[in-house]
Amino acid sequence: MVRYQQGDFIAATALIDRISPRLHRFFVAQSLSRANADDLLQETWLRIHKIRHTYRPGEPALPWFFAIARHIRIDHYRKFVRISTRERELEEMSKEVGAVPHEGSTVSELESLLAPLAPSQREVITMLKIEGMSLEEVARATSSSVGSVKQKVHRAYKKLREKIGTRSGTRGSGGLS
Amino acid sequence: MKDEGIDNILKKASQGSQDLDPRVLKHIGEAIKPSLHPVRPLPPVWLMSLGLIAICVVISVAGAARAGFFGIAKMNGLERSLVFPVLALLACLTAISFVHQMIPASRSYVSPARLLLLCCLALFADFAYLFRDYHTDHFFSVGIVCLAVGLLHAIPAGLCSWLLLRRGFAANFVTAGLAAGTLAGLAGVGMLELHCPNFQAAHILFWHIAVLPASAALGALLGWAYRLLMQREDGRPL
């Protein structure tokens, strides 16, 4: 990261190769389509590049990347809400016609597993359990306290336990296989 | 099911998630290459905090010097030793909080909203202990002037603070604005304590402390407006 700040292109590409899959997985886990996740990843890197001087050498880099990715996702969500409110009528019309599934709109196992969680719980679970970040790092990335992160994880696990229990119960009764 | 079982299911599900297209990575690399030049990292937190405190002190003292140091002149030793150190301590905490708000993923121990509450309560307790003149003369007409004067000094303090930290990046504009507003409000309260000779408890407890939430609300509002502006600019068609 320090070499990237010093303008080293090889270090920058190495960083992009190493961090991007994690950020992409983070966006996909937030119930975004693959195309949207790709767009947000590019937007995140442009922002990272613009504010790379705000990273302080010696500090953990992963929370810094995820804090920016989270900011971009929230911005995207707000834009989405604004646009969807304006275009509700158009969406209703397209529903009547019958929506054509886009490439990449298939729901992955991870997305379907995290679907019942609130967005804040989803992002905490993704960072902590999938990306392997520590509680302290997640707290930094989400601008919250370690206690708040623990509480979100606890509530998320409660929901996940219910969902997995229901799913295995349905499977047992021959509903899904 | 135990937590370990859920952990394993999550790990398995994430392994099966879609891979990232290498063309996207190549595109990102190409996009940043032309502007890849060395950058100077932000200064240490303590240095930026010190700069913010200096701005607040300069604006408070300059304002009081222009209007007159009547307040500090009327105070006794105990009042001086309990009002200004408490204000300085709160300004230090708020300056550090504001700096952390302007650095992504920076460790912050207390949220700006809680810090605002802490500042208001600490000043209330401090002033309630020191100022025990319970008469109220011209409560509204005199008080509104103090509130306006405090805010008039808070605005330049807030603007200068924002200018000092302009290289930072606020992940949340509203909370960053709230922290900046609280710090600016403390500069306004500091100016009033140096200048205002009205030691009536009701006046100080209500109108002087009111500068703090008013300035913080203004800061949060500006942060919110700035965020809206940024979103509109981002959403504007090319």
Image (spheres, coloured by chain):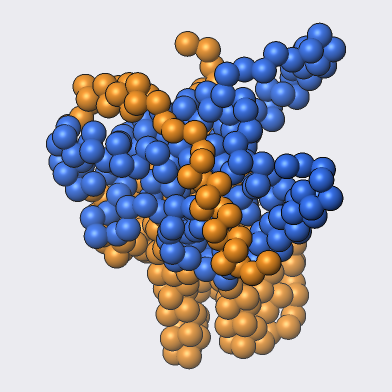
Give residue A8's quadrant in the image: top left
User: Residue at 40% of width from left, 58% of height from top?
Assistant: B106
Mark yes or no: residue B167 visible: no
> What percent of the width, then of the height, locates residue B188?
51, 60
Image quarter (top left, top right, bottom left or bottom right) of the N terminus of chain B: bottom right
> What percent of the width, then of the height, locates residue B3?
61, 67
In the rendered image, the vertical position of residue B79 relative to residue A4, given as above or below: below
Chain A image colour: blue
Chain letter of the orange region: B
Side of B61 relative to B119 (left or right) = left
Mark yes or no: residue A62 visible: yes
User: Residue at 79% of width from left, 53% of height from top?
Assistant: A172
In the depicted view, which residue is nearer to us: B210 or A73?
A: A73
Total number of numbered labels? 0
User: Residue at 84% of width from left, 50% of height from top?
Assistant: A173
Check the image and name the residue furthest to the bottom.
Answer: B78
In the depicted view, which residue is nearer to us: A168 or B164?
A: A168
> What percent of the width, then of the height, locates residue B30?
26, 21
